[in-house]
Amino acid sequence: MALNNPAYAAWRRRLQWAISLAALAVAMAWTPAARAQAAAAPAAETTRTVLVMGDSLSAAYGLGATQGWVALTADRIAKSQPGWRVVNASISGETTAGGAARIVDAVVRHKPAVVVIELGANDGLRGLPLREMKVNLARMIGASQSVGAKVLLVGMRIPPNYGPEYTQGFERNYTALAKQFDVALLPFLLQPVASDRSAFQNDNLHPVASAQPKLRDHVWTALEPLLK
């Protein structure tokens, strides 16, 4: 197309006009007032996560999905702690070995700010070696801390079936780990209901629905400070 062609000249004028309008629109959008308004706009809130790694006691075994203490805790957090959520990664029958095998994937996937570790009961009921239990829990705590998460270690007590040395060593694992890694400790999850037989299902292991609010409140005493 010749540069002195009238049609070409008209097309060029239209193009220059369109460019000028676009530049004017951008300039108007970013006047000092507009820039100040954008700067004052609050940044989108980032949701922080509480990740629960537990066994059947946290997986609401024998209950409805919304009846367990973890679900009740999630409801409380939704109402009282804006910007937080709860992810329940608990599995019925889980041991500390299973938790240790899953923890890296879980913390990478969910990027939690707080990790609640409620494991060990199944190790104790099966008489698994205490040293392995301690090592597994240590791995879970270390993996959680490696992504900057605070940790709440939830302890358990077991019947004296395997003798006092095993029973006492089982409990000491939790206190020793909490001290070693400087993490929060709730010594015994079932403390509020342990002496009440009516608070348990027929297996005498898992609390009934009416006992779950007591467990929620018990855990809350140690969890709430970590949400600040």
Image (spheres, helix red, strand yellow):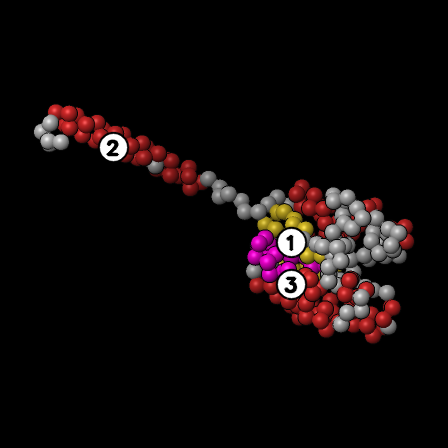
**Who comes first in sequence, dot 2 or dot 1?**
2
Q: Which residue is mark 1?
A: 51
Residue at left offset 77%, top offset 54% = 57
Kindly state the secondary structure of the residue where label 2 is placed.
helix
**Horizontal side, residue 58 vs residue 162: left or right:** left
Q: Which span is picked out in magenta? A: 100-118
Crowding near the residue tagged with mark 1, few <14, some 14–19, many ≥20 C-alpha atoms within 10 Å: many
Residue at left offset 69%, top offset 62% = 98
Determine the CA span between mark 3 and mark 1: 15 Å
User: Comparing marks 3 and 2, which lies closer to the viewer?
Assistant: 3
Q: Quadrant of residue 191?
A: bottom right
**Who comes first in sequence, dot 3 or dot 2?**
2
Kindly state the secondary structure of the residue where label 1 is placed.
strand
Determine the CA span between mark 2 and mark 1: 52 Å
Q: Amino acid at mark 1?
A: Leu
Crowding near the residue tagged with mark 3, few <14, some 14–19, many ≥20 C-alpha atoms within 10 Å: some
Q: Which residue is mark 3?
A: 101
Q: Amino acid at mark 3?
A: Ala
**Who comes first in sequence, dot 3 or dot 1?**
1
Q: Where residue 83 sits: x, y (%)? A: 59, 45
Q: Which residue is mark 2?
A: 19
Residue at left offset 83%, top offset 51% = 207
Q: Where residue 152 sits: x, y (%)? A: 68, 59
In the rendered image of this protein, does residue 61 appear above or below residue 134?
above
